[in-house]
Amino acid sequence: MLVMIISGGFDLSVGAIGIGASVSAAALMTNGTSIGVAVLVALGVGVVAGAFNGWLITKVAISPFVATLGSATLITGIVLTQTGGKAIAGLPESFSNVGLGRTLGIPNPVLIFAGVAFLTWLMLRATRVGHYTFAVGSSKEPARLAGVPVDRVLLCAYIIGGLTAGIAGVVLLGQTNVGQPTGTENWALAAIAAVVVGGTPLRGGIGGIYSAILGTLLLGVVSNALNLYGVSPYWQPAVTGVVILLAVGIDSYQRKLRGAIT
């Protein structure tokens, strides 16, 4: 989500992509496909879905909000149709090691998170695509006039978003060992909140992996606090929404003040 927001967009379909990847891997493994192949197919689902979003935004010229909301509905419909709304069980017990196991005493999901964060930082700071992403997010037309391949950069951003959503779906499957066709409806909201709360503005062109990590940790603290105080889980998405509104509102107010001073 960080990469897509820096590029000037966002993705409301990450939860649906995660479920699509998770259910695909579960269906393959229950039919005897090896774990490695099933995981690769799940990641491929994420890449294809991300590329589809990017194509809608760059070639069909649909806004990111409408394009990703539409693709989320489409993917969810396909998953529910193929599964009949039922969970897929009977996965190999060894696969749960992905979501519940440890390596050198560190939970595997933490290592996966750290690996994705490092690769994202490396891409944004040490590659041409990363530098172009900031340029496109700052202003598309000047970037285009400067020779930046805007469409390809945006397509790459949404492919990265789809791939990481697929990784999240695989981790979720490893934690539950059941392919659930629902349950990730709040992923997009939570991901946007994590990025925005960390200090990355929704207007694009600015941001870094450290802010996204900080926002993720802060939201984790808030979620744990709500659980400790016995707050209903139904209220937690509402709290996340309030956090997003506060973060965006404060950023907008600060920009307004800076403009007035200038």
Image (cartoon, rainbow, N blue to C red):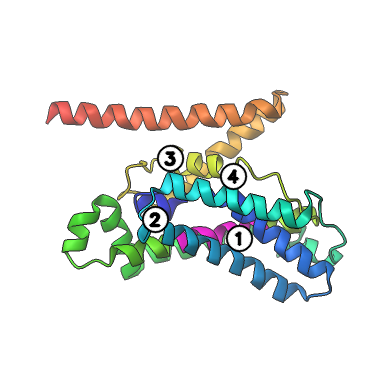
Disc 1 versus disc 3: nearer the observer = 1
**Residue at the (77%, 69%) spot, across then down:** 28
**Residue at the (63%, 29%) spot, across then down:** 236
Q: CA distance from mark 1 to mark 4?
A: 12 Å
Q: Position of residue 113 (x, y in %)?
A: 58, 57
**Relative to 203, 259 lies left or right:** left
Q: Earlier in the sequence, mark 2 or mark 3?
A: 2
Q: Which residue is mark 4?
A: 187
Q: CA distance from mark 4 to mark 2?
A: 21 Å
Q: Residues within 10 Å of mark 4 (few under 14, many from 20)?
A: some
- Residue 135 makes an appearance in the image: yes
Q: Which residue is mark 2?
A: 57
**Relative to 43, 180 lies left or right:** right
* Amino acid type, callout 1: Gly
* Amino acid type, callout 2: Ile
Q: Which residue is mark 3?
A: 196
Q: Residues within 10 Å of mark 1 (few under 14, many from 20)?
A: many
Q: Which residue is mark 1?
A: 166
Q: CA distance from mark 2 to mark 1?
A: 20 Å
Q: Earlier in the sequence, mark 1 or mark 3?
A: 1
Residue stretch in magenta: 158-169
Q: Secondary structure at mark 4?
A: helix
Q: CA distance from mark 1 to mark 3?
A: 22 Å
Q: Position of residue 123 (x, y in %)?
A: 40, 66
Q: Nearer the viewer, residue 6 or 50?
A: 50
- Residue 105 makes an appearance in the image: no
**Residue at the (52%, 45%) spot, across then down:** 191
